[in-house]
């Protein structure tokens, strides 16, 4: 069954906006998704009715606030099929989650000369924390290459992973849309004795995420790309690994006891949640997960496949050699992300001209400069879709691109 | 399209398609890189200074039409000028971009001293002011040139 996109659009207040007489065509969900009413009102409800600090009050509001936070954790645990709720740690975003792992697990387990493996399609969030650690610890970073078809080139993977302590990579590229072979890579990394961190920031919004099935040791995603609010993300990790890790930030919440001599850490997951947490954001994330569960991630995914199939065909038919679309040609091998170059126009100019018609896309390096270098471009234009987009949005995009052509290549 | 026509004037597109003074200069010309982290645009300014005069200038890197056209026009106007003259042009251009030098104590605009400088083709970039994010594109090469001049004059002190 197809998604009723017209009905879904009604759930998103911002999509009702009309600017200069034109409605919004939002094609930047890989950057951040829009939020349905239910998410916004869950956050408002919390502040209107239950605002209090958590885990330390002895009155009804505080109990409600604690229940809101912890029930969101249960929802996340169910959504990604975690073994238990202790494995779900709330962080600010995916960037913080990866920094948490590099600063705690990384600092303890990686020493001079050790090897970690990344891929060329990583977001800076999964590169810079490792560069920082590599500099401090003198560890070596090896890179899995990206092939011409936008897929990872695993031909020398066994050599790269040999002797490595960690493989950290994106399950879906935020530029190419490529789904990487997560399960296979995790298995091969584990065989070689490496731990595996999966950056599922793009994957989780687009596809059913099952941490057992994917076989990772750590997995992260960020709430704001998943219909949730900005300011909350998730780090999932295997309990025994999280248990053995030192804490990240120190302060309230993360301790059992503090004396003048020292402290002892709290149990999981609070050991990694220092200070007052983001309760409203957790409420919002919980509501986002409810919303997606009600629709069904399988339907979200199949909608996206058919929409990307339409977009790939339409843009190629309309613009032929004038457009270069990066990444896999087959919609089943990619998420709802479409990066392209067009008519010798710079992405920044393309985005500006499209903005005139209220079409929101992203132009730039997408925080993936090493990948830009592989593609041989400084920047790309990127249109990215979600469950509230349909073929009419792609048609408007194509119309907008005709205007770009009229300005940059009139004849 | 009116606003867009104002932004993408033919002269700008012409400089974008056929940038002037593109390339590199060999040592001892000074090389300076500028980045716009927002969109990944990158400009490399090479200047050959001689006796306080910009003998030659070349531009490398890549970027959008606004940053490329602005850089291209900049090379045309500053080439052959003395450093002092070039600095006045830089100042005048930034004022056109609505960027004013501010006093430390407040946001009071310093009286313009450069309003009578003829910016020629560069006037075409005036449309950029309506698009605040693009001002950074238009000024990238200029800021890099300023940095370049600073670096050269400081090391030769
Ligand atoms: C693949 C990937 N990883 C990590 C991130 C970082 O997400 P956040 O900025 O929410 O930490 C992004 C977001 O752009 C992403 O696309």
Image: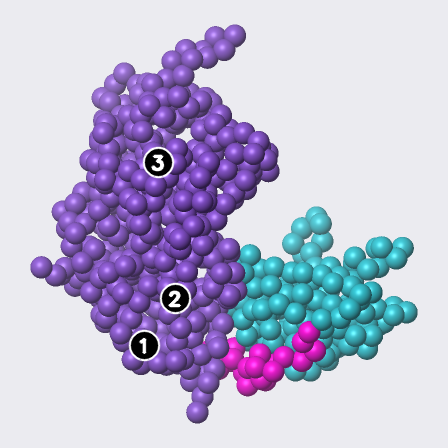
Q: Could you confirm whether marks 1 and 3 are on the same chain?
A: yes
With A75 as the anchor, is B69 left or right in this view?
Answer: right
Q: Which quadrant holds the N terminus of chain A?
A: bottom left
- Mark sitting on residue A316: 1
A170 and A113: which one is in front?
A113
A177 and A284: which one is in front?
A177
The answer, for residue B84, to whether it is visible in the render is no
- When asked about the image quadrant of residue A7, the answer is bottom left
With A234 as the anchor, is B134 left or right in this view?
Answer: right
Chain B shade: cyan
- Disc number lying in front (1 or 3): 3
Q: Which residue is mark 3?
A: A190
Asked whether A155 falls inside the magenta stretch, the response is: no
Relative to A68, does residue A118 appear above or below in the rendering? below
Q: Which residue is mark 2?
A: A326
Q: Position of residue A177 (x, y in %)?
A: 34, 58
């Amino acid at each position: 069954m197809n998604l009723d996109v017209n009905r879904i659009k009604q759930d998103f207040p911002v999509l009702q906006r009309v600017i200069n007489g034109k409605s919004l065509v939002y094609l930047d969900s890989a950057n951040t998704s829009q939020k349905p009413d239910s998410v916004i009102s869950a956050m408002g409800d919390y502040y209107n009715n239950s605002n209090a600090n958590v885990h330390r009050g002895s009155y009804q509001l505080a109990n409600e606030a604690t229940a809101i936070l912890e029930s969101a954790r249960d929802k996340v645990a169910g959504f990604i099929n975690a073994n238990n709720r202790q494995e779900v740690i709330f962080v600010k975003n995916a960037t913080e989650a990866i920094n948490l792992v590099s600063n705690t697990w990384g600092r303890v387990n990686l020493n001079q000369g050790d090897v970690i493996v990344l891929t060329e399609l990583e977001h800076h969030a999964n590169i810079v924390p490792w560069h920082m650690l590599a500099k401090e610890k003198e560890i070596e970073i090896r890179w899995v290459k990206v092939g011409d078809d936008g897929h990872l080139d695993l031909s020398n993977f066994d050599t790269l992973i040999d002797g490595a302590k960690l493989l950290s990579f994106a399950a879906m590229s935020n530029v190419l849309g490529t789904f990487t072979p997560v399960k296979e890579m995790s298995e091969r990394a584990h065989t070689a004795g490496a731990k595996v961190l999966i950056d599922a920031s793009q994957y989780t919004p687009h596809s059913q995420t099952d941490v057992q099935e994917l076989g990772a040791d750590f997995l992260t995603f960020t709430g704001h790309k998943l219909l949730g609010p900005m300011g909350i993300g998730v780090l999932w990790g295997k309990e025994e690994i999280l248990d053995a890790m030192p804490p990240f930030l120190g302060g309230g919440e993360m301790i059992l006891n503090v004396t003048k001599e020292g402290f002892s850490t709290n149990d999981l997951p609070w050991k990694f949640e220092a200070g007052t947490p983001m309760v409203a954001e957790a409420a919002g994330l919980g509501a986002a997960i409810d919303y997606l569960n009600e629709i069904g991630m399988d339907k979200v995914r199949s909608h996206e496949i058919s929409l990307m199939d339409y977009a790939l065909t339409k843009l190629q038919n309309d613009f032929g050699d004038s457009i270069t679309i990066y990444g896999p040609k087959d919609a089943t091998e990619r998420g709802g992300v479409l990066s392209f170059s067009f008519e010798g126009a710079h992405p920044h100019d393309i985005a500006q001209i499209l903005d005139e018609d209220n079409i929101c896309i992203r132009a730039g390096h997408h925080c993936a400069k090493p990948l830009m270098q592989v593609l041989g471009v400084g920047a790309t234009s990127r249109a990215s879709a979600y469950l509230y987009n349909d073929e009419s949005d792609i048609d408007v995009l194509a119309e907008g691109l005709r205007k770009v052509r009229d300005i940059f290549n009139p004849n | 399209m009116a606003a867009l026509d104002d932004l993408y004037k033919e002269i700008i597109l012409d400089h974008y398609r056929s940038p002037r003074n593109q390339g590199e200069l060999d040592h001892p010309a000074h090389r300076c890189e500028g980045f716009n982290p927002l969109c990944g645009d990158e400009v490399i300014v090479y200047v050959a200074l001689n006796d306080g005069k910009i003998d030659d200038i070349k531009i490398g890197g890549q970027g959008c039409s606004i940053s490329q056209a602005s850089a291209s026009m900049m090379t045309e106007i500053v080439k052959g000028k003395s450093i002092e003259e070039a600095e006045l042009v830089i100042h005048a251009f930034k004022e056109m971009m609505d960027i004013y030098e501010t006093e430390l104590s407040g946001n009071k605009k310093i009286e313009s001293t450069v309003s009578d400088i003829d910016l020629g083709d560069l006037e075409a970039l005036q449309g950029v002011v309506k698009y605040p994010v693009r001002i950074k594109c238009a000024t990238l090469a200029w800021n890099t040139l300023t940095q370049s001049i600073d670096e050269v004059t400081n090391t030769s002190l």
